[in-house]
Amino acid sequence: MKTYKPTTPSQRKMTTVTYRGVITTNDPYKPLTNGFKRGVGRNAFGRITSPYKGGGHKRSYRDIDFKYDILDIPAKIETVEYDPNRSGFISLVSYRNGAKRYVLVPKTMKVGDTFIVSETADTEVGNRTSLKNIPVGTFVYNIELQPKGGSKLVRSAGVYAQVVAHDNGFTSVKLPSTEIRKVVDTCFASIGEVSNEEFRLRNVGKAGRSRNLGRRPKTRAMAKNPVDHPYGGGEGAQPRGTRRPKTKQGKTTGGHKTRAPKKYSNVHIVSRRVVRKKK
């Protein structure tokens, strides 16, 4: 992690990820980039429906390949790049047939390394194969939920899942949240851990960086007017005034379970995640 001299109060605790020696280029591959509209918390009428979002630095979107539809052809890593739209590093890879793709790069892989997407691929870091061919205890990421449906699980910086069992056409996978879930064993997953594990240690440090990330200032509920929040109003500091904690829309919160009791994927959950207290 990179720290800063405390020349200002905000820089006293500010930390950033060290990119020197990891990132190999600052210029993205233009054919795989395009503009996009960012979510700013407003609906089609322009009204705020998700507060405290908006602004942020202008970004170009990198078209990441999560489907990995080029099979049985080796690919070589050409660059390791920063992506402003996700926490992990990405790499521009070139397949032997000439195709180029952006992929989420795993930890320990560097420029010049190769990988392959195949049913018969070895269990080496970077390779991608079906879950039924991955030994128990192996760390994986970029996991599909439906065969050929594209990667959906375990894509954030520094995270990984672990294969814990194979049984009756399903593979049980322990996710970063500690939840153990069954996934169809013909779904593909990549071997290894997502890069940039230091991301979780960063300290934003000052409000200006939060604004660049698209985060607007938050106002305490009790400091608002009664029309704006159930906790609002009163002279000076006031207690909540409601029996149960609520959101601005009046929905119960504070430990209240929000998952649908009859959700279609409940049958695939072997063990629920362990809920820990925030530090």
Image (cartoon, rainbow, N blue to C red):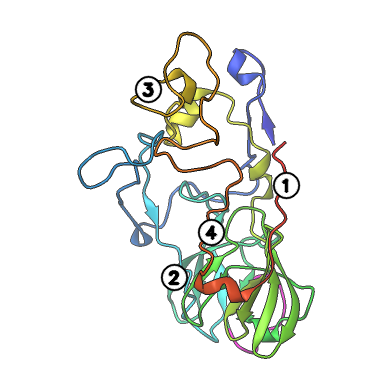
Provide the residue designation for mark 4: 259
Q: Is residue 167 visible?
A: yes
Q: Earlier in the sequence, mark 3 or mark 4?
A: 3
In the current view of this chain or complex, which residue is farthest to the right?
Answer: 137
Residue 5 in the figure: left or right of residue 209? right
Provide the residue designation for mark 2: 100
Q: Amino acid at mark 3?
A: Pro
Tell me the tag on residue 226.
Answer: 3
Say whether marks 2 and 4 touch (CB < 8 Å): no
The N terminus, quarter of image: top right
Tell me the tag on residue 130.
Answer: none
Q: Earlier in the sequence, mark 4 or mark 1?
A: 4
Q: Nearer the viewer, residue 269 or 177?
A: 269
Q: Nearer the viewer, residue 44 or 143?
A: 44
x then y, percent, for residue 216: 42, 30
Which element type, helix, strand or loop, lies under badge 2? Answer: strand
Q: Is residue 120 magenta?
A: yes
